[in-house]
Structure formats: structure tokens, C-alpha cells
Image (tube, grey):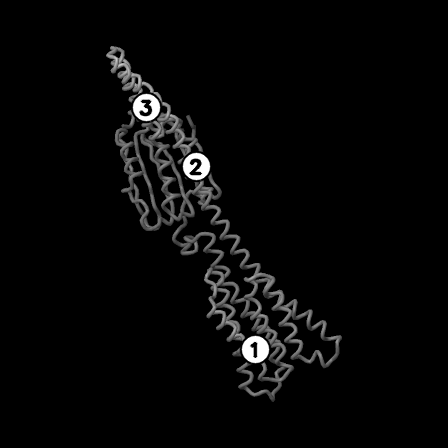
Amino acid sequence: MDTGRVQTGRVGTGRGPGRWRGRWAQTDDVSRVVLYTRTSLPPVFVVVVAAAWVGLWPQVPDSVPDAVVVALLAATLLQTVVTSVVLDRRVRERPLGRRGRVVWAALTLVAVLLCFTTSENVRGPVLGCVLALAVAPLGGWGARRWVPASVLGAVLITAVSDAPAEGARLVVPFLAGFTALFCGAAGTVAVSLWIVDVVRRLARAEEDRARLAVAEERLRFARDLHDVVGRDLAAIAVTSDLVAELARRGRPEAVERAEEVRRIAQDSLREVRAVVRGYRGVDLATELDGSAALLASAGVRCTVEARTDGISPTARTAVAWVVREGVTNVVRHSAATWCRLRVAASDGRVEVLVENDRPVDGSPAGTGSGLAGLAERLRPLAGTVTAGRDGDRFVLRAQLPADATAVPA
């Protein structure tokens, strides 16, 4: 018998997130990464554009009309907004359709044309900023798109600058510098989107692992049931044929064989009930370890606290069934990010608590067949089970005598 144990999964504090953590604590890792990417990229673009204008502003000649300056500001602002919208849709897995791409290209062309409303010494830096913003979203479409676009952008800005007039010695640095700038912008976006995609794939893999774990448990149960029922049904079939043959011949041994068929059927029924109720090989420690592993495979942070001194074997078996049913509900009927399992014995009573966050609409609230069956198993032991929402949590709580000896019906 255990003298007491505390087992912690990947993260374990034993307490769910407090209300002070707000909405951030109630979201999963994928949503957090997506939210971070969506909110971090646009400020980066704004900072880059602002820094470009801080360096450019002293170089704007006094002869440049205010309307031209406003047009240049509008060009950079327009391209910043367009780039932010395109990337936001890409991060949320809502890519632009054909019409959206046409609008994107048209707005980018407008921003580029606005850059040609001023002199060459001002046009170059503003055009470079606009083209960098235009190439950046291509980072989400692979290097085969953004690398050629970066080269073309570098060629365009070099062609409209003073570099060709100064000789070949400035053309190559111009091309190399702006190609590196554009590739850097697109590469930064590509890395950010790659991280989001990796996190999404890992989350899907965790979901697949959870489904596989449940499927494996079902297969194990099916194998146990087949081993019991298949053997006995084969024996019943053979013995029934023998009973029929003896009866046709009027042999008195037919009655004895018929009694044997009944005995085999009764034994098979008892074994099937044992398999269904889980009383063959059900161990509380094993069930706690298996539940922690199942929750971890489902990507759920798990804490297990078990104090089992003074619990009778019958009560331990019942507690194991409560843990199994509770964890199964967490995996199948919630979008939980953390789960707490607690088994404590005090004052002659055992309390089992299975608590998780983020129950989804339609999740069991004490009326499901699994929980109803669990209540039926605990009733002969003078035990009770309750389940339902408690704020933003779902709580399954069961209590029964620690010295229970009755066999559940």
C-alpha cells in the first residue's frame, strides 16, 4: 500500500490559473504564438519606417512642396498597412484569394508611383522602404518567390537612383545592399511564419497522439473481451452441437451437457462483467501513472497528488475507476491546457478530484453515460460522484468510505 506520493507532470503547481492571469492564461500555446506574431510584426514595420523617416527628413530640400512630402508619407503608411493586413491573414491561415492579391498588387503599385512625385535624392530612400515592405509578405510563399522579388526590387531602386550616373563602382554595392535589405525583410517574415507553422504542426501531433492513446485503450479492451468471449463462445458452440446430437439419439447425457453449456455461459458472463468494469488488473498506482502519461501525450499540463494510506483494496479499485473516467472525459470532451488529479484519504473518507480548465460546450456535466455508470459503481460502496462546471473549470469529485469492502454491482 502506498505511504503517500506526489507526482507531477510536465508542469505541476496543483492549482489552476488565477483570474489575474486573464485571457492569456486561458489560451493554448498555438493561440499565444499566433497572437504574438500578429502583434509583433506590424510594430516592427512601423519602427523601421519611422527610423527611415527620421534619417530622411533632414535631407528633404525646402523646395519640395508639402503636398509631395504628404504623398511620400502616405506611400510608406499605405504600404505598411497593406503589408500588415496581408501578413495577418497569412498568420491566421486565411490567405488572400485572387481578388485579394489583385488589390494587394494595385495598392503596392500606387505606393510605388507616389514615390516618383519628388526629387531623386529623396525618392530613393522612400522607394527602398516601400519595396522592402512590399517584398516582406512574400516570405510566407517560399524563397523561390521572395528571392527573385528582392533582386528585381534592388534592380528597380538602383535604376532610379544616382548610382548608374556615378559609374559601375556604385551599381554593384547598391544592388548587393538593397538585395540584402529586401531578402532580410522577407527572411524575417519567413522565419516568423515558419515558427507559427511548426507550433501548429506540433499541436496537431499532440492531438493525434491523444487520439491514438484512446484508440489503443479501446483496442486493449477489445482484445480482452475477445479473449474471454471468443473462447467461451467456441466452447458453447461445440457443446451445444453435442447436446443436440445426444438429444436426437435420446441419450440421457444430453441433460448433463446442457448444464455444462449453462455453466460456461454463466462463467463467461462473470468474466465479461469483470472486463467491462475494469476489475481485472486495475491498480490505482498504475492508473495514476497511465493517466499522467495520457494527459501529457494530449498536451495537457498535469499535476497528480495521491495520499492513499488506509484505503481498502475495494476502495482503491473504485478510485482507479474514477480517475480513469475523469481523465477520459478531459481528453475527449474538453480543450484543457491543465488538469489536476488529487486523491486524499482523511477521517475515514476518500475524496477524488479531477479538475481541468476550458470545458467546451456540450461537455459532460454529470449526465453522460460514463459518469452515470460511475455513479452506479460507487452507489453500493456508499459513494457519491458529482460533476459540472465551476466558473471556467470542470470539476469531477467523488467520495466514498476508505474502508469500503462491498463489491460494486
Query: What mark, if any, has residue 208 been given in the picture?
Result: none
Residue at the spot 36% in from the left edge and 30% down from the top edge: 278
Mark in front: 2 vs 3: 3
Mark 1 vs mark 2, CA separation in Å? 59 Å
Helix, strand or loop at disc 1?
helix
Placement of the C terminus among the 4 image quadrants: top left
Q: Quadrant of residue 152?
A: bottom right
**Residue found at the very far front of the displayed protein:** 249
**Left or right: 315 with respect to 106?**
left
Of callouts 1 and 2, the N-terminal one: 1
Say above or below: 108 vs 138: below
Mark 3 vs mark 1, CA separation in Å? 82 Å
Q: In the rendered structure, which amino acid carries the disc numbered 3? A: Ser
Decide which of 347, 208 is in the foreground and name it.
Answer: 208
Decide which of 395, 196 is in the foreground and name it.
Answer: 196
Q: Position of residue 99 (x, y in %)?
A: 46, 70
Q: Which residue is mark 1?
A: 112
Q: In the rendered structure, which amino acid carries the disc numbered 1? A: Val
Q: Which residue is mark 2?
A: 216
Residue at the spot 29% in from the left edge and 41% down from the top edge: 368
Placement of the N terminus among the 4 image quadrants: top left
Decide which of 9, 115 is in the foreground and name it.
Answer: 115
Query: What mark, if any, has residue 268 been given in the picture?
Result: 3
Q: In the rendered structure, which amino acid carries the disc numbered 2? A: Glu
Helix, strand or loop at disc 3?
helix
Q: Are circles 2 and 3 on residues that touch, CB within 8 Å?
A: no
Say above or below: 405 vs 371: above
**Left or right: 175 with respect to 80?**
right
**Left or right: 381 with respect to 181?**
left
Q: Residues within 10 Å of mark 2 (few under 14, many from 20)?
A: few
